[in-house]
Image (cartoon, rainbow, N blue to C red):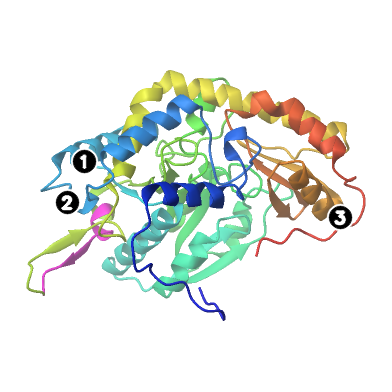
Amino acid sequence: MCHDRCMKQIPEAGVSRQEIEERLEALKSKDIDWRAGRLGVYVFHPGDDVLEVGKRAYAAFHTENGLGKASAFPSLQTMYDEVLEMGASLFQAPEGWGGEMTSGGTESIFLAVQSCRDWTRQQGSSADEILLAQSAHPAFDKAAGYLGLRVKRLPVREDYRADVDQFAAAASKETMMIVGSAPNYPYGLVDPIIELSDLALERGLWLHVDACVGGYFLPWARANGHEIPAFDFSVPGVRSISADLHKYGFAPKAASTLFQRSAEQHAAQAFDFDDWPCGRMTTHTAAGTRPGGAIAGAWAVLQYLGAEGYRERARQIATAHAGFGEAGRAVGLEPMPSDLPILVLETGKGLGRVWRGLRDEGWFTGVVTTPAGLHLMVQPKHPQLVEDFSAALERAPEGTREGAAPRYA
């Protein structure tokens, strides 16, 4: 961050707690009121009771350091292990699986790419290419940039899912990893993971499933009767899965998970070093020090909600998803097909105008540019706000008129 003006200095005398709290409230007053539920991105509101459970658990361990969980803080190690065991069970991991908690989807994806690269080198291959659909998350490009790898993005099918034929044509001896999303972030569509698995097994490629959005949602939607394509370790070619707890697992930030099919793969993820005065250091994550509160908060929310609580919130999301879709259709904004929980309402050239109109009504959504549309990550609180959203859409400027796309920077 750079500023041309005079920079703020650390105060000479400390500021009182009361004044700090007042300043914080003043600063926060400019933010979107996410507690009201009029937010389609960034924050996931499962209910005030769940937020309180996560907050209290986080606060109870906000000082403890996850780096010391194996020695100084065995309580964190117990919770860490149990979170991973619950996730591995949910994703039908085989015997010998490995896993870690991370700070978020970007770190989980980074570590999946890094472990694939190092495992590939251990097999004597210099392959350095990742194949993914145009709809895949930019975190793969970010990881490749850090790790000196190459990414090839491929066109999606007409239905906006990954095109396996494109993957088959593009795969070569230089390819080490192929990627499928469950669901992809732009459209909320699960890629054809079974077909990608067949290709991965045939060509000897590492298939990573990015379930950062859907990992802790899709199994519960399926349990409620929704037709959700297979995406987990029950598909034999899936080698690793990233899934965020702080999205539809409703855990406090920053909490994600990465699962590996085998202990051998998991070992390739490790950083191991002992050429310094303090002895050996081994970590399986990019971060060393990690907030103990994120571990405790995730553990507490998983325990509190249980399978029943997650199924109920998946039901609420499906209800709101349908309601928001009908609200869009009523004003001429067609909802795109989706596997849940993401909804896109096509706006045409009026995207900027509609987005700004909704923002003026107190609603903040994301956007998709191809095709142009409003992008909402539907939440459990949203069934209560379908009528409010519908009224806001009706008051927003018409989506058929031209308008500039919204700017976020």
- Residue 167 located left or right of residue 81: right
**First in sequence: mark 3 or mark 1?**
1
Q: Residue at x 53, y 38 (%)?
A: 44
Q: CA distance from mark 3 to mark 1?
A: 51 Å
- Percent across and percent down for residue 251 are 41, 37
Category of crowding for the residue at label 3, using alpha-carbon neighbours closer than 10 angstroms: few (below 14), some (14–19), many (at least 20): some
Report helix, strand or loop for mark 2.
helix
Q: CA distance from mark 1 to mark 2?
A: 9 Å
- Residue 244 located left or right of residue 303: right
Q: Which residues are magenta?
A: 266-275
Residue toward you, 356 or 250: 356
Eye-nearest disc, 3 or 1 = 1
Q: Residue at x 28, y 65 (%)?
A: 123
Dots 2 and 3: beta carbons under 8 Å?
A: no
Quickly name the residue at label 1.
Answer: 76
Q: Amino acid at mark 3?
A: Lys
Dots 1 and 2: beta carbons under 8 Å?
A: yes
In the image, residue 315 above or below residue 25: above
In the image, residue 70 above or below residue 321: below
Quickly name the residue at label 3.
Answer: 349
Residue toward you, 347 or 121: 347
Category of crowding for the residue at label 1, using alpha-carbon neighbours closer than 10 angstroms: few (below 14), some (14–19), many (at least 20): many
- Percent across and percent down for residue 294 are 33, 44
Q: Amino acid at mark 2?
A: Gly
Q: Amino acid at mark 1?
A: Leu
Q: Residue furthest bottom?
A: 4
Quickly name the residue at label 2.
Answer: 68
- Percent across and percent down for residue 226 are 59, 25
* Residue 94 visible to an observer of this rendering: no
